[in-house]
């Protein structure tokens, strides 16, 4: 397979007064030198091949990354890094322009550049997608066995699963993966059971300093053909990985266990019970692969491994608690109290468990999002930030702790510092947590389409995490796409939200339509989830909706006394003010909310807030909370555009689809 070259074969040129040296991935001006990542330089060279031409996102992704899909986030990040590098190098003006719904074009004046665009030899990367549509059971077993291999290879190939052990070769850990026992009567089940063990064995054999018994030798010891001690002695291994597979009525249950051959002591065990469909094949194999990789790393005392697996501990009980916490979070919107208890127990068992501290910090952040009183919000955010800092200090090369820390950085108003921390996190590893956190950051910064890309990528990496997909309807709604938001909410809602929370989410979507249907009835959702005093207020307000002016006066006279009674009071009341046509009142409510808690600021970008965004006072607000500095350093959001060096306009709107 060919690969995209690390450098572009073309001579140096200048762009906007900055010297560009493609073969050195370098920008230079007046003695200042800025290094670009190879892909960022490749992007610049492609754009420079046809200055002024609008390149579609698809063209750029294919040329630079050589993939058919999945490169959206990489392109957005590369564009941001290119802008930042050009600015840091002292470039004049802007280097490139984002053309909404189309792509990018180079706008900096060039000199010394070739007329012809550089030829990139982009090659398609290995894809984790396939067309699994054959309903025949035998093909289903074949496909899931192959899928497991892909996941394990990806985890090992990430380069962070195992590092060379300092011990001599004779002391290297060794394992035999014996055939998993088929507990299903059909022959197809037997094929799958054998395929699972074969592919795990093939993948583990690629790990440095791990000696894996060969397939033929290991195959002779399935179905209880010998004792563990006999297997260990015959194959000269210290550990044995064994398992069972059972399928029944469209479900598959896989159990795996790692045993010490000499003593028979169980080092680790885990079971996986999932519905077996074409859509979740990769979710199942990813679940198994992460757990097996993490457990083997811990059992073999290998200190550097893929932190997605919850590594960073030598305590298998702590690791087990961590996995239980992740499982408890899967089908909840936020952090389940039981999940937080598991993470807390993991940190108690191993106080130096960075991954557990990162998840605890995340739980504190979500708790602060739901708090009402300003003092309580401040306390929770401080505790969470301290936990995140501890996690980063324990393992500075892990991605997830840095992504969690970044969320506390922007919550304190430092958007640029947070963006830099996210960049470091995403360079270290892209997983569900890092991408979801980054997507929430982009959402609050108003970069909605990029947030949607991050959420979708996160869901691809962990399709079993339904709560990640639950974020999509709100992005569609902010983009004015009510039909998509409605359809996705109907699909996902019952599995993720409690009935009151689902009704509340529907209220959010309804009030942001151009002509909301039955809005008064939707107010019942607010009454159902708020304290009695706030519920009575919403009931009285809903009765005044026929007279919008009177309703706005009633809202303005009463909202302050209820401001800290219910956590989302400001978010809800600001949107009601926007719906009633009182943009100034919406801005006043929003300013008060910004002073106590920035984490709920994503509602700024909802359609019903469009008139508020057009006010000069809104421009003052986003300047005060640090967003404008961030936009100028990175990229402007969909609804705002710069006007010269010192001004900008946030009065842009999109058509709302009902």
Image (cartoon, rainbow, N blue to C red):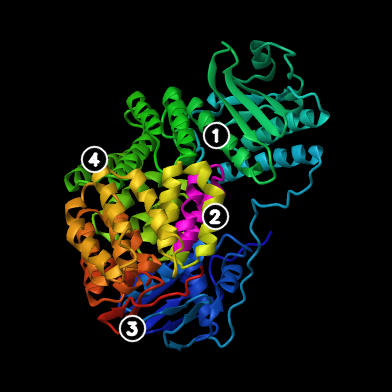
The residue that disc 1 covers is: 293
Q: Which residue appears at 62% of the width and 38% of the height?
A: 284
Residue identified by numbered label 3? 92
Where residue 481 sits in the image (x, y, percent)?
50, 66
Q: Is residue 197 left or right of residue 134?
A: left
Type of secondary structure dominating the magenta stretch: helix
Left or right, 346 with reference to 132: left
Q: Residues within 10 Å of mark 4 (few under 14, many from 20)?
A: some
Which mark lies nearer to you, 4 or 1? 4
Instruction: Read off the residue under disc 4.
Output: 383
Residue 143 appears in the picture as rendered: yes
State the image coordinates of residue 536 (x, y, percent, origin top left): 27, 48
Q: Residues within 10 Å of mark 3 (few under 14, many from 20)?
A: some
Q: Is 86 part of what is drawn in magenta?
A: no
In this view, the mark in front (2 or 1):
2
Say above or below: 234 vs 254: above
Horizontal and vertical percent position of residue 371:
26, 44
Q: Earlier in the sequence, mark 3 or mark 4?
A: 3
Label 3: which secondary element? loop
Mark 3–mark 4 Cα distance, whole angstroms, equals: 43 Å
First in sequence, mark 4 or 1: give its number: 1
Q: Nearer the viewer, mark 3 or mark 4?
A: 4
The residue nearer to you, when weighing 95 against 416, is 416
Q: With respect to residue 258, does 121 lie above or below?
A: below
Q: Which residues are magenta?
A: 452-477
Q: Residue tagged by mark 2?
A: 488
- Rounded to the nearest angstrom, the CA distance separating label 3 from label 2 is 44 Å
- Nearest to N terminus: mark 2 or mark 1: 1
Q: Could you tell me how far apart the alpha carbons at marks 2 and 4 are, in whole angstroms?
A: 35 Å
Which residue is rendered at x = 58% and y = 12% of the image?
264
Q: Position of residue 443 (x, y in %)?
A: 39, 60
Q: Specify which label sits upstream in the sequence, 3 or 2.
A: 3
């Amino acid at each position: 397979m060919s690969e995209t070259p690390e450098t572009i074969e073309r001579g140096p040129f200048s762009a906007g007064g900055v010297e560009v040296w493609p073969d050195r991935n370098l920008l230079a001006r007046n003695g200042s030198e800025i290094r670009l990542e190879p892909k960022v330089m490749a992007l610049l060279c492609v754009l420079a091949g046809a200055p002024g031409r609008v390149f579609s996102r698809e063209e750029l992704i294919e040329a630079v990354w050589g993939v058919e899909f999945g490169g959206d986030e990489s392109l957005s990040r590369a564009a941001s890094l290119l802008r930042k590098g050009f600015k840091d190098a002292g470039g004049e003006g802007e280097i490139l322009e984002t053309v909404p719904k189309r792509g990018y074009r180079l706008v900096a004046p060039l000199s010394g550049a070739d007329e012809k665009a550089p030829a990139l030899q982009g090659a398609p990367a290995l894809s984790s997608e396939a067309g699994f549509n054959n309903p025949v059971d035998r093909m289903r077993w074949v496909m899931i066995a192959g899928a497991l291999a892909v996941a394990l290879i990806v985890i090992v190939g990430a380069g962070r699963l195992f590092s060379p052990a300092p011990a001599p070769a004779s002391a290297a850990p060794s394992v035999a993966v014996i055939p998993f026992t088929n507990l299903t009567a059909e022959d197809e089940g037997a094929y799958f059971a054998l395929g699972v063990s074969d592919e795990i064995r093939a993948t583990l054999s690629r790990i440095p300093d791990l000696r894996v018994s060969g397939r033929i030798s290991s195959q002779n010891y399935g179905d209880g053909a010998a004792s563990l001690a006999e297997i260990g002695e015959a194959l000269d291994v210290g550990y044995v990985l064994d398992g069972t597979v059972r399928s029944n009525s469209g479900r598959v249950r896989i159990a795996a266990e790692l045993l010490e051959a000499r003593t028979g002591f169980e080092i680790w065990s885990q079971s996986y019970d999932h519905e077996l469909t074409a859509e979740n094949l990769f979710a199942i194999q990813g679940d198994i692969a992460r757990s097996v990789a993490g457990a083997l790393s811990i059992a073999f005392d290998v200190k550097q491994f893929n932190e997605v697996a919850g590594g960073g501990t030598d305590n298998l009980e702590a690791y087990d608690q961590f996995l239980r916490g992740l499982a408890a979070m899967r089908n909840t919107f936020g952090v389940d109290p039981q999940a937080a208890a598991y993470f807390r127990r993991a940190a108690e068992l191993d106080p130096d468990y960075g991954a557990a501290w990162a998840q605890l910090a995340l739980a504190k952040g979500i708790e602060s999002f739901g708090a009402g009183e300003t003092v309580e919000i401040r306390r929770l955010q401080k505790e969470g930030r301290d936990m995140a800092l501890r996690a980063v200090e324990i393992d500075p090369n892990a991605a997830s702790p840095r992504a969690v820390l970044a969320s506390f950085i922007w919550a304190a108003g430092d958007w640029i510092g947070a963006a830099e921390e996210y960049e470091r996190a995403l360079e270290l590893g892209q997983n569900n947590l890092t991408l979801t956190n980054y997507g929430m950051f982009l959402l609050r910064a108003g970069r909605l389409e990029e947030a949607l890309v991050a959420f979708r990528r996160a869901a691809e990496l962990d399709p079993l995490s339904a709560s990640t997909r639950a974020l999509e309807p709100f992005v569609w709604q902010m983009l004015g796409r009510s039909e998509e938001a409605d359809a996705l909410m109907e699909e996902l809602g019952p599995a993720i939200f409690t009935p009151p929370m689902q009704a509340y989410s529907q209220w959010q979507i309804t009030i942001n339509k151009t002509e909301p249907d039955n809005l008064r009835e939707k107010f019942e959702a607010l009454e159902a989830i708020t304290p009695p005093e706030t519920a009575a207020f919403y009931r009285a307000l809903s009765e005044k909706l026929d007279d919008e002016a009177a309703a706005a006066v009633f809202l303005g006279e009463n909202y302050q006394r209820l401001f800290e009674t219910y956590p989302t009071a400001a978010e809800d009341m600001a949107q009601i003010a926007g719906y009633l046509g009182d943009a100034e009142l919406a801005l006043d409510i929003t300013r008060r909310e910004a002073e106590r808690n920035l984490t709920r600021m994503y509602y700024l970008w909802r359609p019903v807030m469009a008139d508020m965004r057009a006010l000069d006072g809104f421009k003052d607000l986003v300047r005060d909370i640090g967003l404008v500095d961030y936009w100028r350093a990175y990229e402007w959001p969909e609804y705002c555009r710069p006007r010269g060096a010192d001004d900008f306009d946030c009065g842009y709107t999109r058509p709302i689809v009902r």
